[in-house]
Image (cartoon, grey):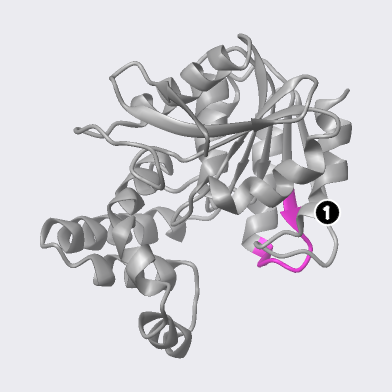
Amino acid sequence: MDKQIISRDGTPLAYRRTGQGPAVVLVSGAMSTGATVTPLAAHLSDRFSVIVYDRRGRGASGDTAPYAVAREVEDLAALIEAAGGEAALYGVSSGGALVLEAAASGLAVRRAAVYEAPFADYGGGAQERAEYTGNLGEALAQGRRGDAVELFLRLTGLAPEMIANARRSPMWAGMEAIAPTLAYDDAVMGDGLVPRDRLASIGVPVLAVAGGASPEWLRRAAKAIAESAPQGVYRVLEDQNHMVEPQVLAPVLTDFFGA
């Protein structure tokens, strides 16, 4: 990241802008920095002015306590202002939930696209989310960052043996370093259910995308998002999973943002 902007509460945000054209801001998900969406930015920058940033508490960006989802919405407002006062937004996973909240908050968002925002569209989802929230808060309060990361990986469905391997890998230290931001993404997700009433207030086009090779509940969630937003569109990318290939997603986003 080679640029910096100051959010409303004084938090410095690191970002990079590439390409020319209408502005698009890319929002990463949990346990990640702006680097995770940089490959997608490369595929979009021939048509758009693409902003990639490190969300607060990660990478080269700062952080300010206490955390609130509204502060992350203000972060996006600052980036949109830097982009010229209006932008389209794209978010992946829990970053998608943040994008939807930003669009519902009345920011100058032209269009909003999300990939597999992990809302549950079934009754047990809220209970599972509540248990995770409680256990995560306890682990972070006690300084058990590794346990917090493991809780998150379990929530994503990663097998125990894969989690054990991850703990022994060189990347584990970096995951522990941003573990406190897991609580931020958890807050963004709310009770874990599709926020239908909130989505109904979004006044701009919304594209909800899911992978055909992902778990079926993620497709149900994307479909529910599209159905709840007044101008919602639902798309499935065949053979894609939660780690969507940027060269497959980029043409879909280009068509949507360029409309």
In the rendered image, is residue 97 in sight? Answer: yes
Q: Is residue 112 magenta?
A: no
Q: Is residue 107 visible?
A: no
Give the farthest residue toward the top. Answer: 85
What is the span of residues highlighted in magenta in the rendered image? 209-216
Q: Which residue, as the protein is rendered here, is positioned at the far left?
A: 142
Along the viewing direction, whichever of 70 and 17 lies nearer the viewer: 17
Q: Quadrant of the C terminus?
A: top right
Secondary structure state at the residue bearing disc 1: helix
The answer to which quarter of the image holds residue 241 is: bottom right
Between residues 169 and 240, which one lies in front from this camera angle?
Answer: 169
The part of the image, by quadrant, that contains residue 206 is top right
**Tag 1: residue type?**
Gln
Q: Is residue 99 above or below residue 87?
A: below
The residue beneath circle 1 is: 247
Q: Is residue 214 magenta?
A: yes
Q: Determine whether, in the image, residue 56 is placed left or right of residue 112.
A: left
